[in-house]
Image (cartoon, rainbow, N blue to C red):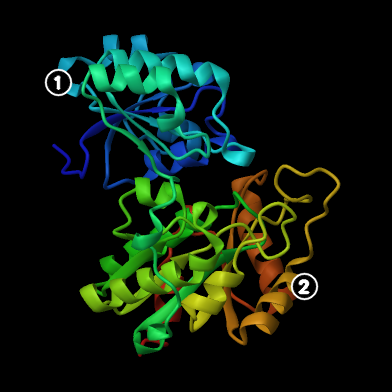
Amino acid sequence: MKTTIDGKAVVYCDGAFNTPNGKTAHGLVRFTERYEVVGVIDGNYAGQDAGLVLDGKKSSIPIFSDLEETLAQIGPENKPKSLVIGLAPDGGRLPVEAKETIKKALELGLNVDSGLHDFLYNDDELMVIAKKNNCRVRDVRRTPERDQLHFFTGKIEEVDCLKIALLGTDSAIGKRTTAWILVHAFRKAGLKAEMVGTGQTAWMQGAKYSMIMDSCINDFVSGEIEHAVHSAWKNESPDLIVIEGQGSLMNPAYPGGFEILAAGRPDFVILQHAPKRIEYDGFPGYVLHPVKDQINAIETISGKKIIAITVNHEDMTKEEILPTCENINQETGLPAVDVLVYGADELVELLRARLK
């Protein structure tokens, strides 16, 4: 039996699995220490293995058409404790049809975790059912009370281990997945690495040191990043801290990354890029800035060097990946690797040489 923080869970991702709007579910299928995922709900892929659909790798996590089918087929020994909302749509809004599944879950006594901006605790109907059935409802993006937040102090300068920011040329481009792969590869190599999560999915995956940038009050964003990084260093004494990026510097709707550079003060940056992506995620007509322009912008703002490009192979055949990496290397002078397909050993050696 897998040891987890919150036990077995089924992930709701109806109509969004294997699309950019399902990235929270994708993260939970690939890796989570918070839950043991026993099923995914999406009628489009019912009857299939979630890992095979997502990455061509069997995960033994089945996909079901709805909650009733899930509970009927997984058996009592796999009964979930929680329903987790695996959707990540633009704007973080809860689809109307999802409420019925949440209602059924609460009526059946399941806890519900949601990382959306539409907070379930504001829904009186759902909260009455939750209270009646003694169910826990967590809105992961709910902003902590102000007395729990941290303001930037400068204590980040005490952190003397290697710090890497994993930024991207766009949103929903695989920054978090690559960050986890790198952390796990470092640990496999016998080194200590910690992930600092900056979004709701990293928290759902069990990142011990996390803050959620897009729901944090602006005055405290830098302080929360600093506090998470400093706590990871102080408590764990790692060789490496990887800070998960958010959005991208030039995405019109999600211009994330500056606070991570300013407050997290990474020693180097690794940049995630999808070579076949033409326009910014969800915004037709907004052409993605060339990767060399994005490298220049990040290095100019931060004064830190980008030392590698990690490739997202969306819309590419496997045969295209290595030649594409070689083209990026020739264009930028930087090593380029698809860690989801080929692993992160090359990056581990690259960073090992820079350990403090």
> Looking at the picture, how far across and down is residue 249, in whole percent?
68, 65
For marks 1 and 2 on the same chain, the one whose residue lies earlier in the sequence = 1
> Looking at the picture, how far across and down is residue 19, in whole percent?
59, 35
Q: Residue at x 52, y 81 (%)?
A: 268
> Looking at the picture, how far across and down is residue 82, in whole percent?
28, 28
- The amino acid on which the numbered mark 1 sits, given as a three-letter code, is Glu
- The amino acid on which the numbered mark 2 sits, given as a three-letter code, is Asp
Question: Does residue 169 lie above or below 35 as drawn?
Answer: below
- Residue at numbered disc 1: 77
Q: Is residue 108 left or right of residue 163?
A: left
- Residue at numbered disc 2: 293
Label 2 CA crowd tier, 10 Å (few <14, some 14–19, many 20+): few
Question: Does residue 95 lie above or below 168 as drawn?
Answer: above
Toward which corner of the image does residue 12 lie, by quadrant?
top left
Q: Is residue 25 left or right of residue 233?
A: right
Query: Alpha carbon of mark 1 to alpha carbon of mark 2: how far?
Result: 53 Å
Q: Residue at x 20, y 14 (%)?
A: 75
Q: Is residue 324 visible?
A: yes
Quarter of the image that includes the N terminus: top left
